[in-house]
Image (cartoon, grey):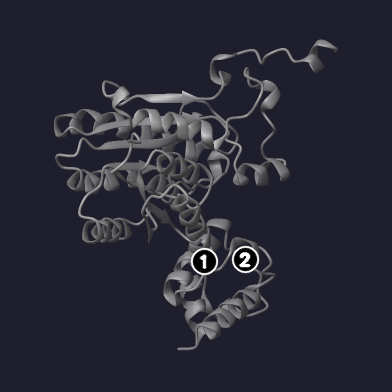
Amino acid sequence: MKPLEGKLALVTGSGRGIGKAIAMKFASQGCDIIVNYFRRREAAEQTCEELKQFGVKTDIVKANVGDPDKINELFDTIGERHGHLDIFISNAASGVGRPIMEIDSKAWDWTLNINAKAMLLCSQRAAGLMEGRQGKIVSISSLGSTFVWPTYAAVGVSKAALEAVTRYLAIEFAPKGISVNAVSASAVATEALKFYMKEGLVKDMSSTTPVGRMVTPEDVANAVAFLVSDEAYMIRGQTVIIDGGTSIALVPPVTEKSENK
Amino acid sequence: MSVEEQVKDIVSKIAHIDKDIMSRESTFKEMKADSLDIVQALVAIEEQFDIEIPDEEAQKFRNFGDFVAFVEQEVAKKG
Protein backbone atom coordinates (compact mmCIF):
# COMPACT_ATOMS: atom_id res chain seq x y z
CA MET A 1 0.00 0.00 0.00
CA LYS A 2 1.30 3.44 -0.91
CA PRO A 3 1.96 5.79 2.04
CA LEU A 4 -0.82 8.29 1.21
CA GLU A 5 -3.36 5.87 -0.24
CA GLY A 6 -6.91 6.78 0.78
CA LYS A 7 -5.90 10.32 1.74
CA LEU A 8 -7.26 13.52 0.20
CA ALA A 9 -5.08 16.61 -0.16
CA LEU A 10 -5.84 20.20 -1.13
CA VAL A 11 -2.84 22.01 -2.61
CA THR A 12 -3.50 25.68 -3.27
CA GLY A 13 -1.92 27.09 -6.42
CA SER A 14 -1.19 23.62 -7.80
CA GLY A 15 -1.70 24.34 -11.50
CA ARG A 16 2.03 24.90 -11.90
CA GLY A 17 5.39 25.33 -10.19
CA ILE A 18 5.98 24.15 -6.64
CA GLY A 19 2.30 23.41 -6.00
CA LYS A 20 2.16 21.13 -9.03
CA ALA A 21 5.33 19.31 -7.93
CA ILE A 22 3.81 18.74 -4.47
CA ALA A 23 0.58 17.45 -6.03
CA MET A 24 2.57 15.09 -8.28
CA LYS A 25 4.63 13.79 -5.35
CA PHE A 26 1.51 13.15 -3.26
CA ALA A 27 -0.23 11.44 -6.17
CA SER A 28 2.80 9.20 -6.69
CA GLN A 29 2.21 8.12 -3.09
CA GLY A 30 -1.44 7.30 -3.79
CA CYS A 31 -3.06 10.52 -2.54
CA ASP A 32 -6.21 11.93 -4.16
CA ILE A 33 -5.73 15.59 -5.03
CA ILE A 34 -7.85 18.73 -5.12
CA VAL A 35 -6.11 21.14 -7.46
CA ASN A 36 -6.81 24.78 -6.63
CA TYR A 37 -6.05 27.53 -9.11
CA PHE A 38 -6.64 31.26 -9.29
CA ARG A 39 -6.64 32.35 -12.92
CA ARG A 40 -5.32 29.59 -15.21
CA ARG A 41 -7.85 26.81 -15.57
CA GLU A 42 -5.99 25.26 -18.50
CA ALA A 43 -2.84 24.72 -16.39
CA ALA A 44 -4.94 23.21 -13.59
CA GLU A 45 -6.64 20.84 -16.03
CA GLN A 46 -3.26 19.84 -17.42
CA THR A 47 -2.02 19.11 -13.88
CA CYS A 48 -5.07 16.90 -13.27
CA GLU A 49 -4.37 14.96 -16.45
CA GLU A 50 -0.79 14.35 -15.31
CA LEU A 51 -1.94 13.35 -11.81
CA LYS A 52 -4.29 10.74 -13.23
CA GLN A 53 -1.31 8.68 -14.50
CA PHE A 54 -0.87 7.65 -10.85
CA GLY A 55 -4.40 6.26 -10.73
CA VAL A 56 -5.63 8.78 -8.17
CA LYS A 57 -8.85 10.79 -8.09
CA THR A 58 -8.62 14.51 -8.85
CA ASP A 59 -10.84 17.53 -8.48
CA ILE A 60 -10.41 21.17 -9.50
CA VAL A 61 -11.67 24.16 -7.53
CA LYS A 62 -11.04 27.76 -8.55
CA ALA A 63 -10.48 30.29 -5.76
CA ASN A 64 -8.53 33.43 -5.04
CA VAL A 65 -7.26 32.66 -1.55
CA GLY A 66 -6.60 36.35 -1.02
CA ASP A 67 -10.37 36.81 -0.68
CA PRO A 68 -11.99 35.45 2.51
CA ASP A 69 -15.33 34.92 0.73
CA LYS A 70 -13.63 32.82 -1.94
CA ILE A 71 -11.87 30.79 0.77
CA ASN A 72 -15.25 30.01 2.29
CA GLU A 73 -16.63 29.04 -1.12
CA LEU A 74 -13.57 26.80 -1.69
CA PHE A 75 -14.05 24.90 1.57
CA ASP A 76 -17.85 24.80 1.22
CA THR A 77 -17.32 23.14 -2.16
CA ILE A 78 -14.80 20.65 -0.74
CA GLY A 79 -17.18 19.89 2.13
CA GLU A 80 -20.08 19.27 -0.24
CA ARG A 81 -18.13 17.19 -2.74
CA HIS A 82 -15.85 15.22 -0.41
CA GLY A 83 -16.98 15.75 3.20
CA HIS A 84 -13.44 15.57 4.57
CA LEU A 85 -9.80 16.53 4.05
CA ASP A 86 -6.56 14.88 5.25
CA ILE A 87 -3.86 17.24 4.02
CA PHE A 88 -3.86 20.97 3.33
CA ILE A 89 -0.88 22.64 1.64
CA SER A 90 -0.88 26.44 1.72
CA ASN A 91 1.20 27.07 -1.37
CA ALA A 92 -0.55 29.78 -3.41
CA ALA A 93 1.43 33.00 -3.24
CA SER A 94 1.60 36.40 -4.82
CA GLY A 95 3.30 39.64 -4.05
CA VAL A 96 4.32 43.08 -5.07
CA GLY A 97 8.04 43.58 -5.59
CA ARG A 98 8.86 47.17 -4.74
CA PRO A 99 11.40 49.15 -2.69
CA ILE A 100 10.01 49.70 0.79
CA MET A 101 9.22 53.40 0.24
CA GLU A 102 6.96 52.47 -2.67
CA ILE A 103 4.86 49.90 -0.82
CA ASP A 104 1.40 51.37 -0.34
CA SER A 105 -1.47 50.01 1.70
CA LYS A 106 -2.99 48.26 -1.30
CA ALA A 107 0.22 46.42 -2.21
CA TRP A 108 0.74 45.44 1.42
CA ASP A 109 -2.80 44.07 1.82
CA TRP A 110 -2.70 42.17 -1.48
CA THR A 111 0.56 40.46 -0.51
CA LEU A 112 -0.25 39.79 3.14
CA ASN A 113 -3.77 38.54 2.34
CA ILE A 114 -2.66 35.92 -0.15
CA ASN A 115 0.56 34.86 1.55
CA ALA A 116 -0.32 34.98 5.25
CA LYS A 117 -4.00 35.57 6.01
CA ALA A 118 -4.98 32.76 3.64
CA MET A 119 -2.99 30.28 5.75
CA LEU A 120 -4.95 31.28 8.84
CA LEU A 121 -8.40 31.29 7.24
CA CYS A 122 -7.85 28.15 5.15
CA SER A 123 -6.43 26.24 8.13
CA GLN A 124 -9.44 27.21 10.26
CA ARG A 125 -11.75 25.76 7.61
CA ALA A 126 -9.49 22.78 6.88
CA ALA A 127 -9.47 21.82 10.57
CA GLY A 128 -13.24 21.35 10.44
CA LEU A 129 -12.84 18.82 7.64
CA MET A 130 -9.95 17.01 9.37
CA GLU A 131 -11.73 15.97 12.57
CA GLY A 132 -10.60 12.53 13.67
CA ARG A 133 -8.33 12.15 10.63
CA GLN A 134 -4.85 13.09 11.98
CA GLY A 135 -4.68 15.98 9.51
CA LYS A 136 -1.50 17.54 8.19
CA ILE A 137 -0.96 21.13 7.19
CA VAL A 138 2.17 22.53 5.54
CA SER A 139 2.79 26.10 4.44
CA ILE A 140 5.30 27.14 1.80
CA SER A 141 7.50 30.00 2.89
CA SER A 142 10.71 31.50 1.55
CA LEU A 143 14.08 32.59 2.90
CA GLY A 144 12.92 36.17 2.42
CA SER A 145 11.13 35.77 5.76
CA THR A 146 14.49 36.02 7.51
CA PHE A 147 16.92 37.44 4.97
CA VAL A 148 16.66 40.69 3.06
CA TRP A 149 16.43 40.70 -0.74
CA PRO A 150 15.97 43.77 -2.94
CA THR A 151 12.30 44.76 -3.50
CA TYR A 152 11.16 41.76 -1.43
CA ALA A 153 9.98 43.62 1.69
CA ALA A 154 6.24 43.01 1.37
CA VAL A 155 6.67 39.36 0.43
CA GLY A 156 9.40 38.82 3.03
CA VAL A 157 7.19 40.23 5.80
CA SER A 158 4.25 38.15 4.58
CA LYS A 159 6.38 35.01 4.73
CA ALA A 160 7.56 35.88 8.25
CA ALA A 161 3.89 36.21 9.24
CA LEU A 162 3.14 32.92 7.50
CA GLU A 163 5.80 31.14 9.55
CA ALA A 164 4.48 32.69 12.77
CA VAL A 165 0.91 31.65 11.92
CA THR A 166 2.27 28.16 11.26
CA ARG A 167 3.81 28.00 14.75
CA TYR A 168 0.65 29.19 16.51
CA LEU A 169 -1.54 26.82 14.52
CA ALA A 170 0.82 23.93 15.32
CA ILE A 171 0.33 24.41 19.05
CA GLU A 172 -3.39 25.16 19.00
CA PHE A 173 -4.13 22.33 16.55
CA ALA A 174 -1.96 19.72 18.32
CA PRO A 175 -4.82 18.64 20.63
CA LYS A 176 -6.97 18.19 17.52
CA GLY A 177 -4.41 15.69 16.17
CA ILE A 178 -3.44 18.03 13.34
CA SER A 179 0.24 18.68 12.64
CA VAL A 180 1.32 22.00 11.13
CA ASN A 181 4.74 22.87 9.70
CA ALA A 182 6.36 25.04 7.05
CA VAL A 183 9.05 24.60 4.45
CA SER A 184 11.13 27.53 3.37
CA ALA A 185 13.06 27.47 0.13
CA SER A 186 15.62 29.75 -1.45
CA ALA A 187 15.01 30.72 -5.09
CA VAL A 188 13.37 27.70 -6.70
CA ALA A 189 13.97 26.90 -10.37
CA THR A 190 10.40 27.34 -11.65
CA GLU A 191 9.06 28.88 -14.85
CA ALA A 192 8.36 32.05 -12.86
CA LEU A 193 11.99 32.25 -11.75
CA LYS A 194 13.21 31.71 -15.32
CA PHE A 195 11.18 34.78 -16.27
CA TYR A 196 12.79 36.87 -13.51
CA MET A 197 16.24 35.60 -14.51
CA LYS A 198 15.58 36.54 -18.12
CA GLU A 199 14.52 40.01 -16.96
CA GLY A 200 17.78 40.28 -14.99
CA LEU A 201 15.96 40.53 -11.65
CA VAL A 202 17.37 37.27 -10.26
CA LYS A 203 20.71 35.60 -10.90
CA ASP A 204 21.37 31.92 -11.45
CA MET A 205 22.43 30.78 -7.97
CA SER A 206 23.91 27.41 -8.96
CA SER A 207 27.50 28.53 -8.39
CA THR A 208 26.78 30.13 -4.99
CA THR A 209 24.77 27.18 -3.65
CA PRO A 210 27.05 24.80 -1.71
CA VAL A 211 25.56 21.71 -3.36
CA GLY A 212 26.24 23.22 -6.80
CA ARG A 213 22.72 23.51 -8.19
CA MET A 214 19.55 25.46 -7.58
CA VAL A 215 16.60 24.14 -5.56
CA THR A 216 13.97 22.45 -7.73
CA PRO A 217 10.21 22.21 -7.10
CA GLU A 218 10.76 18.47 -6.55
CA ASP A 219 13.23 19.21 -3.72
CA VAL A 220 10.50 21.21 -1.98
CA ALA A 221 7.90 18.52 -2.69
CA ASN A 222 10.13 15.83 -1.14
CA ALA A 223 10.39 17.81 2.10
CA VAL A 224 6.64 18.44 2.17
CA ALA A 225 5.97 14.73 1.60
CA PHE A 226 8.18 13.93 4.59
CA LEU A 227 6.34 16.45 6.79
CA VAL A 228 2.96 14.89 6.00
CA SER A 229 4.28 11.37 6.69
CA ASP A 230 3.89 9.54 10.00
CA GLU A 231 7.69 9.68 10.42
CA ALA A 232 7.40 13.44 10.99
CA TYR A 233 4.78 13.04 13.75
CA MET A 234 6.82 14.80 16.45
CA ILE A 235 7.84 17.73 14.24
CA ARG A 236 5.46 20.60 15.00
CA GLY A 237 5.48 24.25 14.06
CA GLN A 238 8.89 24.09 12.44
CA THR A 239 10.17 25.79 9.31
CA VAL A 240 12.36 23.37 7.38
CA ILE A 241 14.85 25.15 5.14
CA ILE A 242 15.43 23.77 1.65
CA ASP A 243 18.34 25.70 0.17
CA GLY A 244 21.26 23.38 -0.46
CA GLY A 245 23.11 25.11 2.39
CA THR A 246 22.99 28.63 0.95
CA SER A 247 21.65 30.37 4.05
CA ILE A 248 24.38 29.09 6.38
CA ALA A 249 27.27 29.65 4.00
CA LEU A 250 28.24 33.24 4.72
CA VAL A 251 31.03 32.98 2.17
CA PRO A 252 29.85 31.47 -1.13
CA PRO A 253 31.60 28.22 -2.04
CA VAL A 254 34.80 28.37 -4.07
CA THR A 255 34.05 27.31 -7.62
CA GLU A 256 36.54 26.29 -10.27
CA LYS A 257 36.01 29.60 -11.97
CA SER A 258 36.86 31.66 -8.89
CA GLU A 259 39.89 29.45 -8.13
CA ASN A 260 41.31 30.45 -11.48
CA LYS A 261 41.01 34.15 -10.72
CA MET B 1 -24.40 48.50 -19.89
CA SER B 2 -21.90 47.77 -22.70
CA VAL B 3 -18.79 45.66 -22.11
CA GLU B 4 -16.68 48.81 -22.47
CA GLU B 5 -18.73 50.63 -19.84
CA GLN B 6 -18.48 47.70 -17.45
CA VAL B 7 -14.70 47.41 -17.94
CA LYS B 8 -14.36 51.15 -17.45
CA ASP B 9 -16.41 50.94 -14.28
CA ILE B 10 -14.27 48.15 -12.81
CA VAL B 11 -10.92 49.73 -13.73
CA SER B 12 -11.94 53.15 -12.44
CA LYS B 13 -13.04 51.72 -9.10
CA ILE B 14 -9.94 49.56 -8.62
CA ALA B 15 -7.36 52.11 -9.76
CA HIS B 16 -9.26 55.16 -8.47
CA ILE B 17 -9.31 56.73 -11.91
CA ASP B 18 -11.86 59.31 -12.98
CA LYS B 19 -13.94 57.66 -15.74
CA ASP B 20 -14.03 60.94 -17.65
CA ILE B 21 -10.30 60.81 -18.38
CA MET B 22 -10.42 57.19 -19.59
CA SER B 23 -10.49 56.78 -23.36
CA ARG B 24 -9.60 53.89 -25.63
CA GLU B 25 -6.36 55.69 -26.45
CA SER B 26 -5.32 56.12 -22.81
CA THR B 27 -2.31 54.10 -21.69
CA PHE B 28 -2.25 52.62 -18.19
CA LYS B 29 0.72 54.85 -17.44
CA GLU B 30 -1.24 57.94 -18.43
CA MET B 31 -4.11 56.78 -16.23
CA LYS B 32 -1.58 56.28 -13.41
CA ALA B 33 -2.59 52.64 -12.97
CA ASP B 34 0.24 50.57 -11.49
CA SER B 35 0.98 46.89 -12.05
CA LEU B 36 -1.11 45.80 -9.06
CA ASP B 37 -4.07 47.90 -10.28
CA ILE B 38 -3.84 46.10 -13.61
CA VAL B 39 -3.66 42.63 -12.01
CA GLN B 40 -6.62 43.41 -9.76
CA ALA B 41 -8.57 44.74 -12.73
CA LEU B 42 -7.80 41.57 -14.71
CA VAL B 43 -9.00 39.42 -11.81
CA ALA B 44 -12.20 41.44 -11.38
CA ILE B 45 -12.97 41.41 -15.10
CA GLU B 46 -12.30 37.67 -15.40
CA GLU B 47 -14.74 37.19 -12.54
CA GLN B 48 -17.36 39.55 -13.94
CA PHE B 49 -17.43 38.05 -17.44
CA ASP B 50 -16.31 34.49 -16.59
CA ILE B 51 -13.42 34.70 -19.05
CA GLU B 52 -9.64 34.24 -18.83
CA ILE B 53 -7.16 36.92 -19.79
CA PRO B 54 -3.72 35.27 -20.03
CA ASP B 55 -0.84 37.40 -18.72
CA GLU B 56 0.92 37.00 -22.08
CA GLU B 57 -2.08 38.66 -23.77
CA ALA B 58 -2.35 41.36 -21.10
CA GLN B 59 1.30 42.29 -21.66
CA LYS B 60 0.45 43.10 -25.29
CA PHE B 61 -2.18 45.70 -24.41
CA ARG B 62 -0.84 49.08 -25.58
CA ASN B 63 -3.74 51.04 -24.17
CA PHE B 64 -7.17 50.78 -22.58
CA GLY B 65 -8.72 50.23 -26.01
CA ASP B 66 -6.68 47.03 -26.55
CA PHE B 67 -7.82 45.83 -23.13
CA VAL B 68 -11.49 46.50 -23.91
CA ALA B 69 -11.19 44.94 -27.36
CA PHE B 70 -9.77 41.72 -25.90
CA VAL B 71 -12.54 41.51 -23.30
CA GLU B 72 -15.20 42.18 -25.98
CA GLN B 73 -13.71 39.44 -28.15
CA GLU B 74 -13.68 36.90 -25.29
CA VAL B 75 -17.23 37.80 -24.24
CA ALA B 76 -18.41 37.42 -27.86
CA LYS B 77 -16.74 33.98 -28.06
CA LYS B 78 -18.82 32.89 -25.10
CA GLY B 79 -21.92 33.96 -26.99
Q: Which residue is mark 1?
A: B42
Q: Which residue is mark 2?
A: B58
Q: Nearer the viewer, residue B47 or B17?
A: B47
Q: Marks 1 and 2, how far apart in space?
A: 8 Å
Return the x and y of residue A94 as percentages of the image width and height: 48, 48
Give me the residue at 58% from left, 30% from top: A215
Q: Is residue A173 above or below residue A126?
A: above
Return the x and y of residue A57 as percentages of the image width and height: 36, 53
For the question of whether residue B29 can be seen, the reply is: no
Give me the residue at 60% from left, 68% from top: B31
**Position of residue B57 in the picture relative to residue A140 (left or right):** right
Q: Chain of mark 2?
A: B
Return the x and y of residue A60 as percentages of the image width and height: 39, 59
Q: Chain of mark 1?
A: B
Q: Is residue A178 above or below residue A244?
A: below
State the SS at label 1: helix
Amino acid on which the number 1 mark rests in the picture: Leu
Question: Considering the image in quadrants, where does the C terminus of chain A appear?
Answer: top right
> Do labels 1 and 2 touch, CB within 8 Å?
yes
Return the x and y of residue B45 as percentages of the image width and height: 48, 72
Mark 2 closeness class: few <14, some 14–19, many ≥20 residues within 10 Å? some
Question: Considering the image in quadrants, where does the N terminus of chain A appear?
Answer: top left
State the SS at label 2: helix
